[in-house]
Amino acid sequence: MIVDKPAGAKKVFAENGWESSEEDLIEVMLSDKPGSLGRVAAKLGQAGVNIEYAYTGSARSAQRVNTYFSVSDLKAALKALR
C-alpha cells in the first residue's frame, strides 16, 4: 500500500495490530501508451538497476499513469531516469 502520510498510516496500522514496513520508492509518471513502461525498464536495466517490484495506478488524467518502483539501487535509478 502506498500512502501520502506514512506516519498517520503507521499509527492506524499499529492501533489495529497490523504489521507495516516502509520503503523508498521511485514514482514515475508514464504516458498510457504501449512501450512507456519498457522504455523506463530499459533505462534502469542499462544502469544495472533491478526492479524488485512495481505498482501502477491511474493519474488524474486518463492519458498518464503513476508507476512506483522498488529498485535495487535507488541512487543509480534516480540518475538513470533523469
Image (spheres, rainbow, N blue to C red):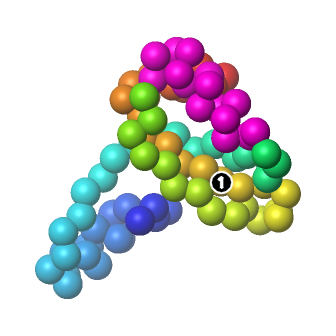
Which region shows up in magenta? 35-49
**Amino acid type, residue under disc 1 in the picture:** Asn
* Residue in the image at 53% along x and 48% along y: 68
Instruction: Assess whether residue 66 is covered by the magenta stretch.
Output: no
For the point 46% across and 64% down, the residue is 3
**Residue 79 visible, this angle:** no
Question: Does 9 sit above or below residue 59?
Answer: below
How far across and down, in percent of the image, does residue 36 sit? 74, 40
Q: Quadrant of the C terminus?
A: top right
Image position, residue 80 (x, y; %) = 59, 19
In the rendered image, the vertical position of residue 5 relative to residue 71, given as above or below: below
Q: Residues within 10 Å of mark 1 (few under 14, many from 20)?
A: some
Q: Image height check: is 25 above or below 41? A: below
Q: Which quarter of the figure has residue 2?
A: bottom left
Q: Tell me the residue at 77%/65% (across/down).
A: 60
Image point (70%, 30%), residue name: 39
Q: Is residue 39 magenta?
A: yes
Q: Name the quadrant of the N terminus.
A: bottom left
Residue with the most extreme left position: 17
Picture coordinates of residue 17, whole percent (x, y):
14, 80
Helix, strand, or loop for circle 1? strand
Give the left or right position of residue 16, taking residue 7 as reference: left
Predominant SS along the magenta part: helix
Q: Is residue 3 visible?
A: yes
Residue 25: x and y in percent read 45, 43
The residue pinned by badge 1 equals 66
Nearest the viewer among 60 and 41 is 41
